[in-house]
Image (cartoon, rainbow, N blue to C red):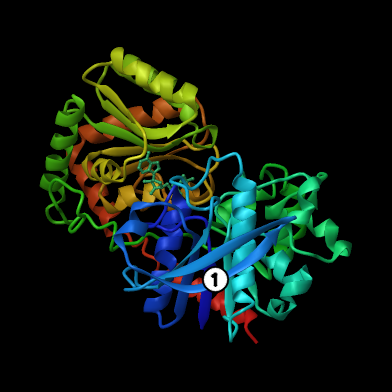
Amino acid sequence: MEIIHVSAECYPVAKAGGLGDVVGALPKYQVAAGHIAKVVLPMYRTKFLYENKWDVVHKSSAYLGATWFDYTVIKERDNVLGFDLYLVDINGLTDREKVYGYSDDTERFMSFQIAVVDWLANWQHHPDIIHVHDHHTALIPFMIKYCYSYQQLASIPTVLTIHNAQYQGQMDWSRSNYIPHWDGWQWGILDWHNMINPLAAGIRSAWKVTTVSWSYLEEMRMESNGLEALFEYERGKCVGILNGIDTKVWDPSTDKYLEQHFDIDTMASGKRANKEWLCAEFGLQPDKPLFIFIGRLVGEKAADLLPRAIGDSLYYINQRMNFLVLGSGEPHIEAELSHMTHYWPGVYNARIGYNEQLSHRMYAGADFLLMPSRVEPCGLNQMYSMRYGTVPVVRRTGGLRDTVIDFGEPNGYGICFNAASVGDITQAVYRGVELYQNQMQFDVIRRQLMEKDFSWDISTEQYIDLYKSLVP
Ligand code: ADP
């Protein structure tokens, strides 16, 4: 089967979060299962672009509204990622250093989608499946169904995976001319609350919609940033498929970023060596349990609760633990977390920014990973932490609910709590500190974590079964 993934992110080419990890791994596993998987991304100006060799495979032009733009599709020459990788270069729009965060993101991702569809319309054959990810590519199923110039693609089954429904890419109707000449009778497919809503249009137009965990699918019918009724209405075409992790990239016995490698047999000493490095680097105390947080500093991740939860834990539990935070996001949360380093020297530190290497070292050296998320479609951090023998401390929501069982329950191995509140987080930290004192039980749990299989194998099969159900 030939599958073409269209996405805004793909690790290690360009990553801002979990979407990048998924699109970097799933195609690799699909190729290993005997299929042809291709990935198409905008051509950002990233390190990966300059470090690899490229061939031009297609050059053409298209319209974005009244503006004519040229685009070039290049293909990575040596198959270094284990699948075919194509980048679409649109002068002045895609060739930027960051993936998102520009005032013309709407124009950037619209022209990217138009270029992809225009290029696909030029292929001599059709792929079996077009798989799009999140709102940045969610108009593609609409375009191939309802744009007059791309009707030859209309019979290709499309799958939309929703990694995060909070972001929907809304634009006002004055931009409807961005979409290449389309069947005006279908305006209702684009519209949601008087705006063009690309995610809603994708949900309505794609043949199948997947979400990245079962619980998230259920939760979206109650809370999905305004799309609840749509998820309820379209539930028949929605399926939850849990993300996996790339166990080759995330392997503590080979991870190129670690101070010391370890496996299940050398877990205690290996983790200790990594913890000592971290503590020395950040002025923390290796004999106390180390709690970490890694992620976007936004409300979805409940990062706004961290300053008080950390402060209360340190105060009420007598500084019996250390905290280390790595993240970037809302400026006031960044400022508060930075400012706190002066109040709690020796037991708290924070690094504001994005740092892939440090994140690996933190998963390896920490004892506990905090994830108090308000919304967590799947969450990868908890799976990485478990693979590295770090106990996840998570709020019961979305994918966290589906992947972590509290150690107080039969066969449990994590710490779970119900509310995204300072009190619940502090209580969970207290349980972690107590568990850490019982070294024997703590070690049994850490081994249990490292034995768990979160690889892509099962989910890859589920995606293939889904594709097969669509291909005649
Ligand atoms: P998201 O909602 O951000 O996509 P996920 O849990 O699905 O959350 O994925 C987050 C990914 O991004 C993980 O690989 C995590 O390690 C990484 N990550 C997030 N913030 C940072 C950061 N500041 N530095 C390094 N890696 C980060």
Determine whether 105 is above or below 431 in the image.
below
Q: Is residue 385 left or right of residue 181?
A: left
Identify whether 211 is placed above or below 355: below
Q: Is residue 209 visible?
A: no
Residue at 47% across, 58% down? 43
- For the point 22% across and 49% down, the residue is 444
Residue 418 location in percent, x, y?
Answer: 51, 36
Residue labelled 1 has its Cβ within 8 Å of some atom of ligand 1: no
**Screen quadrant of the C terminus:** bottom right
Q: Residue at x 41, y 83 (%)?
A: 34
Q: Is residue 45 left or right of residue 444?
A: right
| Quarter of image, res 207 | bottom right
Closer to the camera in the image, 235 or 171: 171
Q: Residue 146 appears in which quarter of the rendering?
A: bottom right
- The kind of residue tagged 1 is Lys
**Residue nearest the observer in this picture, 170 or 427:** 170
Relative to residue 105, is residue 237 drawn left or right? right
Residue at image point 54% right, 37% down: 300
Give the residue number, with chain letter if any, for mark 1.
59
Q: Residue furthest top?
A: 343
Q: Secondary structure at mark 1?
A: strand
Q: Quadrant of ligand 1?
A: top left
| Image coords of residue 259 (percent x, y) | 14, 45
Front residue of 365/10: it is 10
Label 1 CA crowd tier, 10 Å (few <14, some 14–19, many 20+): some
Residue 196, percent across and down? 76, 50
Q: Is residue 108 visible in the rendered structure shown here?
A: yes
Quadrant of residue 362 in the image? top left
Q: Is residue 216 above or below residue 87?
A: above
